[in-house]
Image (cartoon, rainbow, N blue to C red):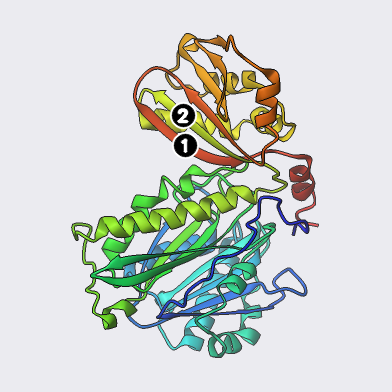
Amino acid sequence: MATAVSPLAPKSYPEMPELEGVQFSTAEAGIKYKGRTDVLLAKMVEGTTAAGVFTRSKCPSAPVDWCRSVLKSGTARGLLVNSGNANAFTGVKGKSAVALSAKIAASALGCEENQIYLASTGVIGEPLDAEKFSPVIDELASMSKPTGWLDAAKAIMTTDTYPKIATVSVELDGKTIVINGMAKGAGMIAPDMATMLSFIFTDAAIDAHALQDLLSSQTEASFNSVTVDSDTSTSDTVLLFATGAAKARGIEAVQSSDDPRFPVLQAALGDLMQNLAQQVAKDGEGARKFVEVRVEGAQDNASAKVIALSIANSPLVKTAVAGEDANWGRVVMAVGKAGEPADRDRLAIWFGDIRVAVNGERDPDYSEEAASEVMKHDEIIIRVDLGLGSGENRVWTCDLTKEYVAINGDYRS
């Protein structure tokens, strides 16, 4: 695990309010790491509903397969997560490991195995020894508490340099409901329906189908809009749980996406998910710069997204950012290779507020000094106007440094 905390890490962490209906505990099970927590158990009250989005990788991990299967029930009582081993590409052993993990957790929580959700993160191809959960599971179940969000986020870290948590509150029926979340991820980040690992909880009562609609509606503009290195993980998982505890405070359940309160929940959840997604980009392996790529004037929004990702994923663009080099020619290259409609002679490019190119050539007022000054900032906006239509989109990424190579060259050792 990386030792130096990202310079883009938050200066402080939010105060996470207690969220009625869920409790956490962590433990050291020795999955891979020594001297740190590597297992998280979330215990949820009866009646909790669940929703999930997962990787579209054709080589998904065993926990992803498990979660897809149990999600059909729409209910949850427990979430068991380990770091250090992804339990991916582990064949029959992987299937056996998730079955045993669920059995161990269900026994400790007194619920059905199909009410247990599982997630694993770490090395691919190494069998997971699920027996390591047995010595710690009873303590995890008995020592759980409604606080400890930061500790929970720390337990699921791999090459992350800081834990990622966020919270939002929103008014429903004149009363407050809470949405809290955590995420992990620093490398192998180019989500496809989800991101690395993220677990979000609310005390609102929401029908399972409406909860799935809620999560799915906010994924594209958040977790699917962040990339560190263009690599989609085998383990990408986002799970959203609604404990329903707010019903006791007189807040009626949201039964469908037609509920007039649904857009309020969408806006709040979207804010939280975008917060977490940006934290992931800011903790990209070896990152020193956070980059927002904005594309406007595209043929449509989908085309703008493809072009934005082409820029954000370009090693040449990312290394130019790392070197604080205002090399707009690399942005031109990334636009041109995206395979989307573009007109060289209508293209305009900005670094921050400095327009560096317009009408297919260098801006006549171009200042190398001004553009270079923008590149010294910790957070940089690269904006492109294609001049073709009204399509627009944005994605978040980071620079590509020598440290990224060092981290991944040593990852399994």
Against 107, is 157 above or below?
above
For label 1, the crowd category at 10 Å Cα-Cα, with few meaning under 14, some 14 to 19 and many 20 or more, is many
Q: Amino acid at mark 1?
A: Arg
Q: Amino acid at mark 2?
A: Val
For the residue pair 137 and 340, the one nearer the viewer reads as 340
The secondary element bearing badge 2 is classed as strand
The secondary element bearing badge 1 is classed as strand
Residue 50 horizontal/vertical position (percent): 37, 68
Residue 277 horizontal/vertical position (percent): 52, 51
33 horizontally vs 307: left or right: right
Residue under the point 50% across and 18% down: 348
Q: Are marks 1 and 2 in contact (CB under 8 Å)?
A: yes
Residue under the point 43% across and 34% down: 393
In the rendered image, which residue does mark 2 sit on?
Answer: 295
For label 2, the crowd category at 10 Å Cα-Cα, with few meaning under 14, some 14 to 19 and many 20 or more, is many
Residue 261 image-quadrant placement: bottom left
Counting residues from the start of the chain, the first of labels 1 and 2 encountered is 2
- Quarter placement of the N terminus: bottom right
Residue 96 horizontal/vertical position (percent): 55, 71
Residue under the point 35% across and 71% down: 177
Residue under the point 80% across and 46% down: 406
Task: Mark yes or no: residue 326 visible.
Answer: no
For the residue pair 42 and 363, the one nearer the viewer reads as 363
Against 360, is 118 above or below?
below
The label shown at residue 394 is: 1
340 horizontally vs 404: left or right: left
